[in-house]
């Protein structure tokens, strides 16, 4: 399958009764923190020009040549079942062009979507061997969601800056500056992974398959030894357990990661699957791509702030309780109701 192949449809998605979302805007499934950042970046004058200028610094052409020469390109003749899943995912999410997809030899399960000019999806052999068809469908949808949201561009820049931070680590101030940017980008990217998980659910339309896939990423191919409800209880215990020391340790543990912890991803996806927003989306009520240019940055940030406030309010984490209490006191003070 050549890069940038047009989306086609042969009836497979429809035959399985999966719903399609014509003209879907990525805002429909993006996590509030992810959406606010993306809306702001898309409205930022000259932003695209700056990132295109970076294409000369980021070894994107080298990556494409490496994949072409040392990985297997998915198509009608190679990994045809993945080829079908990819085309189905692009059809369901209405992605105009089908990204190139490669399978790369790596025993560690993983997937990524990178590229400044055109997104490229890479799946590891460890992932392909680990997941069944419906679990893999959710993963392919996850990566197509990254492509539709434009995450591939920012992920590529994040990889570049991470490598740059390593190369200039001997320059004290330079390293501090780049590390600060990388840390902020990682925090945003962790939220973008929650968005992509939602896109995967829209493609697979099977929440149990999505849950199974996340459980396998955490515990390997021992599904008969695992239980979804018990796995989700782990997330509850993680989010609520411990004292302030544990809260600080959670922050330190997650800082170097590009992805949220697996149990947290499962819990977040389950909450979204049970939400009214998800049901409305499945019923065909969602923002359209043609409306993206009119999306309000202020509204997006307001939704993001509300999302964080709700997380703080409902969290049982000791640190969040302190933050939530301080936030309430400040809000009461502004409203003139403080003591």
Image (spheres, rainbow, N blue to C red):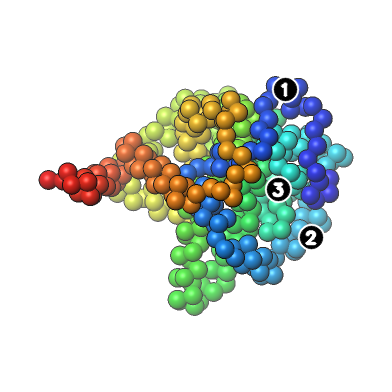
Q: Label 2, on which residue?
A: 65
Q: Which mark is residue 16?
A: 1
Q: Residue at x 59, y 65 (%)?
A: 46
- Up-down relation of residue 154 to residue 197 (above or below): below
Q: Secondary structure at mark 1?
A: loop
Distance between the Cα atoms at labels 1 and 3? 24 Å
Q: Are marks 3 and 2 in contact (CB under 8 Å)?
A: no
The residue mark sitting in front, 1 or 3, is 1
**Residue 149, position in %: x, y?**
61, 47
Can residue 6 be seen here? The reply is yes
Q: Are marks 1 and 3 in contact (CB under 8 Å)?
A: no
Q: Label 3, on which residue?
A: 121
Which comes sooner in the sequence, label 1 or label 3? 1
Residue nearest the viewer, comparing 76 with 90: 90
**Residue 263, position in %: x, y?**
48, 37
Dot 1 crowding, Cα within 10 Å, few <14, some 14–19, many 20+ = few
């Amino acid at each position: 399958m050549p890069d940038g192949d047009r989306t086609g449809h042969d009836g497979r998605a429809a035959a399985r009764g999966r719903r399609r979302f014509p003209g879907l805007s990525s805002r429909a499934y993006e996590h509030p923190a992810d959406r606010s950042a993306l809306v702001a970046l898309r409205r930022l004058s000259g932003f695209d020009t700056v990132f295109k200028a970076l294409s000369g610094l980021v070894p994107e052409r080298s990556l494409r040549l490496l994949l072409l020469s040392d990985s297997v390109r998915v198509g009608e003749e190679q990994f045809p079942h993945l080829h079908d899943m990819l085309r189905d995912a692009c059809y369901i999410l209405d992605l105009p062009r089908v990204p190139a997809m490669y399978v790369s030899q790596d025993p560690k399960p993983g997937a990524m979507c990178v590229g400044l000019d055109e997104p490229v999806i890479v799946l590891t052999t460890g992932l392909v061997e680990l997941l069944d068809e419906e679990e893999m469908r959710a993963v392919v949808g996850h990566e197509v969601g990254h492509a539709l949201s434009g995450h591939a561009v920012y992920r590529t820049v994040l990889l570049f800056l991470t490598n740059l931070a390593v190369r200039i680590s001997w320059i004290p101030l330079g390293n501090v500056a780049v590390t600060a940017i990388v840390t902020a980008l990682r925090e945003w990217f962790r939220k973008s992974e929650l968005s992509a998980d939602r896109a995967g659910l829209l493609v697979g339309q099977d929440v149990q398959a999505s849950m199974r896939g996340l459980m396998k990423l955490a515990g390997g191919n021992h599904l008969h030894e695992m239980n979804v409800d018990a796995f989700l209880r782990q997330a509850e215990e993680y989010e609520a357990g411990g004292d302030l020391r544990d809260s600080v340790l959670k922050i330190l543990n997650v800082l170097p990661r590009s992805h949220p912890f697996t149990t947290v991803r499962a819990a977040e996806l389950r909450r979204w699957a049970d939400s009214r927003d998800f049901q409305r989306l499945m019923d065909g009520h969602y923002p359209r791509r043609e409306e993206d240019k009119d999306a309000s940055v202020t509204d997006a940030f307001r939704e993001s702030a509300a999302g964080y406030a709700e997380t703080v309010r409902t969290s049982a984490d000791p640190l969040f309780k302190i933050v939530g209490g301080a936030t309430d006191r400040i809000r009461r003070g502004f409203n003139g109701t403080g003591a």
